[in-house]
Amino acid sequence: MKLNLKKPIAFFDLETTGLNISHDRIVEISVLKVNTNGEEEQKTWLINPGCPIPPETTAVHHISDLDVKDCKSFKELAPEIAKFFGSSDIAGYNILKFDVPFLMEEFLRAGIDFDIKNRNLIDVMNIFMKMEPRTLKGAYRFFLNKELEDAHSAAADTSATYEVLMAMLDKYQDAEYTDNRGVTSVPVQNNMQALSQFSSHNKNADLAGQIVFDEEGKEVFKFGKHKDKRVEDVFRIEPQYYDWIMRSDFPEYTKKVITGIKLRMSGKNIKF
């Protein structure tokens, strides 16, 4: 289907040094502009962010410091990029939460008044998520091509979940998946351990996801002022942080895990 355009629309995507809109910087921007007559123009700019690109980020988008060392900065390229966008409407995938705010920060730092108030912003991901809701009812419709009766009845939901999992095993049995490190595997297997690992976002040390294991199997905080720091390191530097957690409104199991770590540090152990 051809787009019904009253003015051009620019699809764009960013690659960045990280996910922090305030501190990270753009290293690549690509814009595909579709004009009202259907003609397409595409431009891609590699950008020197003026700061090192973390290795873990390079592993995702494969852009290294060496790739951008001779490139212009965003400030130098900003007028050219803004001109290419012109007055186009803007579209992309997950742009409302990430790409548009990130781009606006860069334009503001470059002194470019890039107006978005008079543009239509179209986030393709949000259309997808709304039309294919990530609910059990939506999954049942997608995988089994039928409607779930008595949704939110515990008995119906458990039976439907069982049916959906079996349908997933059929649909994805040979499907490849590439993670954010660029590692490709076939993770949906008729194996409960493999399914458990793939269905988890993080390897949690507690049940609430307040404490997770890092790549070396060490417990790490996922909340508060010490977020992403190892629990043992924090307790060594600030032992009173343990007492604060015990007094605060955390799940009991999380407190049990924290206590276990504290006891382990003192040479004792606690069984879960």
Image (tube, rainbow, N blue to C red):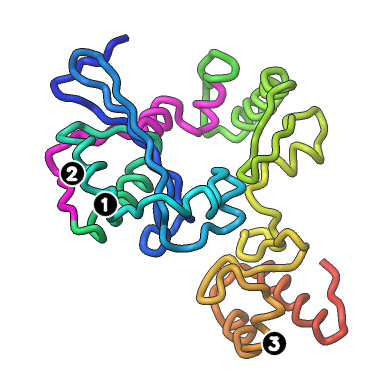
Foreground residue, 75 or 158?
75
* Residue located 57% across and 50% down the image: 58
Q: What residue is shown with label 3?
A: 236
The magenta region covers 112-141
Residue farthest to the top, as pictured: 1
Q: Which mark is residue 116?
A: 2
Residue 69 higher or lower than 181, as above or below: below
**Secondary structure beneath label 3:** helix
Check whether the beta carbons of the residues at disc 1 and disc 2 lie within 8 A of each other. Answer: yes
Foreground residue, 265 or 253?
265
Q: In this rendering, which labeled residue sits more in front, label 1 or label 3?
A: 1
Q: What residue is shown with label 1?
A: 104
**Secondary structure beneath label 1:** helix
* Residue located 65% across and 88% down the image: 237
Left or right: residue 146 versus residue 257 is left
Foreground residue, 181 or 215?
181
